[in-house]
């Protein structure tokens, strides 16, 4: 009787890759320069007091950062990067920074939650607003 020899393929392990846009490999701490902050604040034209509220710092501390041209570090930088990504998406939809600001200030009902200006104060809130902007971009309303 003839023996049949079956060829067994090696199982390749699939490794999930992370999006490189959101995760950057840095040797030093994450920094967000004042110049980038000024560009962001032109895209999201909030007052200095509103920016201080979003970043959970005092108005005076924000003034000092700007005066000393001191870059934002750590969680502040990460929060500003998320806001920068959200602003880019919002400007694709609304075109004008003032329109984006008005939309962000108005309360929105999304998945049994109310999103308004206070949502910008947390990472999760920025993510929820970005998700809503993504739905609007593709015409999917919930």
Image (cartoon, rainbow, N blue to C red):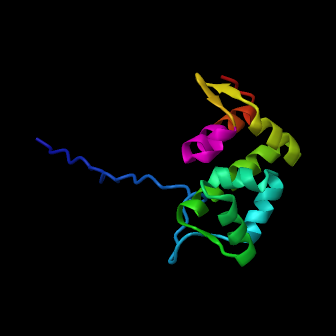
Q: Quadrant of the N terminus?
A: top left
Q: Residue at the location (69% across, 71% down)?
A: 64
- The verdict on residue 89 being magenta is no
Q: Residue at the location (60% across, 43% down)?
A: 127
Q: Position of residue 23 (x, y in %)?
A: 54, 61
Q: How many marks?
A: 0
Q: Position of residue 115 (x, y in %)?
A: 65, 32
Q: Residue at the location (75% across, 28% down)?
A: 139
Q: Position of residue 96 (x, y in %)?
A: 89, 46
- The verdict on residue 124 being magenta is yes
Q: Quadrant of the C terminus?
A: top right
Q: In this rendered view, identify the residue nearer to me: 80 or 139.
A: 80
Q: Position of residue 68 (x, y in %)?
A: 71, 77
Magenta span: chief secondary structure: helix
Point out the residue furthest to the front here. Answer: 60
User: Can residue 31 be seen by looking at this rendering?
Assistant: yes
Q: Residue at the location (73% across, 70% down)?
A: 66
Image quarter of residue 61: bottom right
- Seen in the image, is 136 located left or right of residue 1? right
- Give the vertical position of 133 relative to 64 (above or below): above
User: Can residue 95 be seen by looking at this rendering?
Assistant: no
Task: Tell me where the magenta segment starts and ends, as one range.
Answer: 117-130
- Give the vertical position of 141 relative to 53 (above or below): above
């Amino acid at each position: 009787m003839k023996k049949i020899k079956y060829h067994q393929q090696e199982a390749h392990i699939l490794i999930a890759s992370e999006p490189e846009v959101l995760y950057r490999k840095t040797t030093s701490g994450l920094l967000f320069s004042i110049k980038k902050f000024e560009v962001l604040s032109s895209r999201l034209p909030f007052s200095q007091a509103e920016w201080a509220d979003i970043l959970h710092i005092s108005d005076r501390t924000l003034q000092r950062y700007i005066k000393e041209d001191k870059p934002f570090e750590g969680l502040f930088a990460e929060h500003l990067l998320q806001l920068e990504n959200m602003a880019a998406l919002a400007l694709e939809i609304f075109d004008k920074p003032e329109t984006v600001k008005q939309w962000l200030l108005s309360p929105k009902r999304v998945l049994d939650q109310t999103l308004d200006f206070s949502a910008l104060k947390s990472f999760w809130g920025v993510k929820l607003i970005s998700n809503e902007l993504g739905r609007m971009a593709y015409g999917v309303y919930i």
